[in-house]
Amino acid sequence: MLLRASGRTYDKTYDLAAVTGTPESDGGVPHGRLLVAFAEAVLGDDDAALARTRDALTMALGPPGLVDAAGVVGLFNAIDRVADATGIPLEPEKEAASADFRAALDLDRFAVVDRS
Amino acid sequence: MTGPYASAPYAIRDDLAAAHARAWSRIARPGTWWDGTARVAIAAEARNAPSCTLCRRRKEALTPLSIEGTHDSLDRLPEIVVEVVHRVRTDPGRLGERWYRDVIASGLTEEQYVEIVSVAAHTVAIDTMARGLGIDVLPLPDPKPGSPTHYRPEAAKPGGAWVPWVEPADAGEVEAGIYPSDRLPANIMKAMSLVPAEVRSFFDLVTHQYLPGEVMRDFSREYRAISHAQIELLAARVSALNRCLY
């Protein structure tokens, strides 16, 4: 939702399908394809792919960009666990604001309330 | 460069390195419901979980709990604690309320559970960043002696989550400052409020590894070497990979 809010501020429309992994596109975000590939590699098991993506990201964004990208991936890998392990719901305002793209991207299948 | 990343091949922001050092120091000390030895053992078990055969078989199964067995653990924690740490570490997107209720019925208190989740999450945040950078994980700290405080907020009550939480209006003196004063807290902030010290500790990491709360929606300038849009794309992709709707 903050990705969409960021786009509105700069009058840009980001392709939110990038969130579900669209390898052909940056989704309108500079180096978006590379960032998505980096997130996938960090959470994946292919160390060689991670090394290649890390090098490419460093070339594109510089070492400070790599450090901040790695930090964000790490932090959200943790936040997701807190959210899922405590069973928190989406806030009503976020639920309403994200209904369209959750439906379009079929993200509601991840809803914690539906898990037994 | 000084601190925990003094020998890293990349310059890591001083504030971020310091936040990691503080997190490690807090994990080593007695917490609210677990002592320092147990907290460091929880962190170690979070590191060990990805190599667990039972967790790997469950991850591959259509229904994780249809696979029975014993976790490959470090034998430093009760089995129910190992179960929580391993599931949270290896398959969080399929945790369900029934599993949570079973865990509590097995003898863990809700407060102990929240602190386990928090320590595991701290470890995941720091270790995942190290993997992204291709550097060794930080050595775990040596436990410090002392006893847990056993503080439970009087105002904690069932809310919208599986675990009880503290509503902002009910926060007492000890909980002061865990929530922003200028806006309603997101549910992710309330999630661990049953153990207020863990909210403070985890959001110290959030502030430095992501963004401070007050600038998350300040799109008028950038605060990191990557833009808000780049940060949010990464965050959203990670959450999708983890099958986390939140």
Image: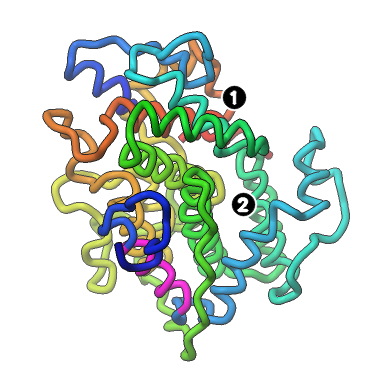
In magenta, the rendered stretch is B18-28
A59 or B117: which is nearer to us?
A: A59
Image mark count: 2
Kindly identify which chain the residue marked by label 2 belongs to.
B
Measured from the top left, where is residue A80 in percent x and y?
50, 43
Q: Residue at x 52, y 81 (%)?
A: B142
The answer to whether residue B180 is seen in the rendering is yes
- Tell me whether the residue at label 1 lies in contact with that at label 2, contact meaning CB atoms closer than 8 angstroms: no
User: Which element carries disc 1, helix, strand or loop?
Assistant: helix
Q: Which residue is mark 1?
A: A109
Measured from the top left, where is residue A39 in percent x and y?
50, 33
Q: Residue B206: which disc?
A: none
Q: Three-letter amino acid code at disc 2?
A: Val
Q: Which residue is mark 2?
A: B88
Kindly identify which chain the residue marked by label 1 belongs to.
A
SS majority, magenta: helix
Q: Three-letter amino acid code at disc 1?
A: Arg
Q: Residue at x 28, y 51 (%)?
A: B207
B100 or B40: which is nearer to us?
A: B40
Which corner quadrant holds the N terminus of chain B? bottom left
Instruction: Give the crowd class for mark 2: few <14, some 14-19, many >=20 residues within 10 Å.
Output: many
Q: Residue at x 69, y 56 (%)?
A: B49
Q: Nearer the viewer, mark 1 or mark 2?
A: 2
B83 above or below B112?
above
- For residue B22: magenta? yes
Measured from the top left, where is residue B96 in percent x and y?
64, 44
User: Which element carries disc 2, helix, strand or loop?
Assistant: helix
B176 or A13: which is nearer to us?
A: A13
A82 with respect to B155 (left or right): right
